[in-house]
Image: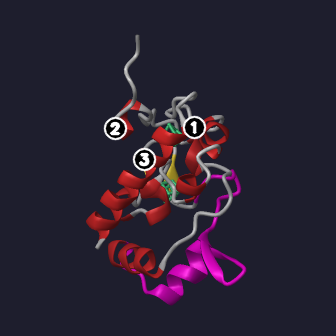
Amino acid sequence: MASDPTTSKDIFECQQCGQCCNGFGGTYVTEDDIENICRYTNTDPETFIDRYCDMSGSRPVLTTKKSGTCIFFDPEKQCTIHPVKPYMCRAWPFIKTLIANPENWDIMANSCPGMKKGITHQDIRRIATAEKTKLDKNMA
Ligand code: SF4
Ligand code: SF4
């Protein structure tokens, strides 16, 4: 009998397929993200927003190439800003909204082959909460 999942690795293992960098709509960037990416790409925030972002309401999101992939996605290298990729990309798939809406997990898993389906809502909520705490601590 399979044992209950206890860690994020039990329910998610990235397959490096790059689908999450393609056509998922808004990858929001926070002020901290902008600061980190600017330092890494030797850009200033104004140029960064002008060159690499679109506005979604009042919030900047990374723009996409004509192909539909994120502006920072390279088919061979994958994420070209990996060491400083936005909070949202680091958090995936343990995004904050899962804590309130764990039923979204299986819908997200339709587009992300690294996510195992059929996990209980209780386990998703617990693991997503733990991962968020860990990420926030690392980024503080
Ligand atoms: S879609 Fe999922 S499995 Fe594919 S690269 Fe993104 S996180 Fe990894
Ligand atoms: S910043 Fe990197 S990880 Fe995030 S969507 Fe773009 S290419 Fe993918």
x, y (%) of residue 88?
49, 61
Q: Is residue 24 left or right of residue 41?
A: right
The answer to whether mark 3 and mark 1 are in CB contact below 8 A is no
Q: Which mark is residue 7?
A: 2
- How far is the residue under mark 2 from the one under mark 3? 9 Å
Q: Does residue 69 belong to the magenta stretch?
A: yes
Give the class, few, some or many, for how many residues have Cα within 10 Å of label 3's Cα (few <14, many ≥20): some
x, y (%) of residue 132?
40, 58
Q: What colour scheme does the image use?
A: secondary structure
Secondary structure at numbered mark 2: loop
Q: Is residue 26 left or right of residue 15?
A: right
The picture quadrant where one finds residue 111 is top right
Disc 3: which residue? 126
Q: Is residue 73 left or right of residue 63?
A: left
Q: Compare residues 28 and 8 and report the one nearer the observer.
A: 8
Determine whether 114 is above or below 36 in the image. Answer: above
Dot placed on the residue nearer the N-terminal end, 3 or 1: 1
Amino acid of disc 2: Thr
Which label sits in the foreground, 3 or 1? 3
Secondary structure at numbered mark 1: loop
Q: Which residues are magenta?
A: 41-70
Disc 1: which residue? 112
Amino acid of disc 1: Cys
The picture quadrant where one finds residue 57 is bottom right
x, y (%) of residue 114?
49, 33
Dot placed on the residue nearer the N-terminal end, 1 or 2: 2
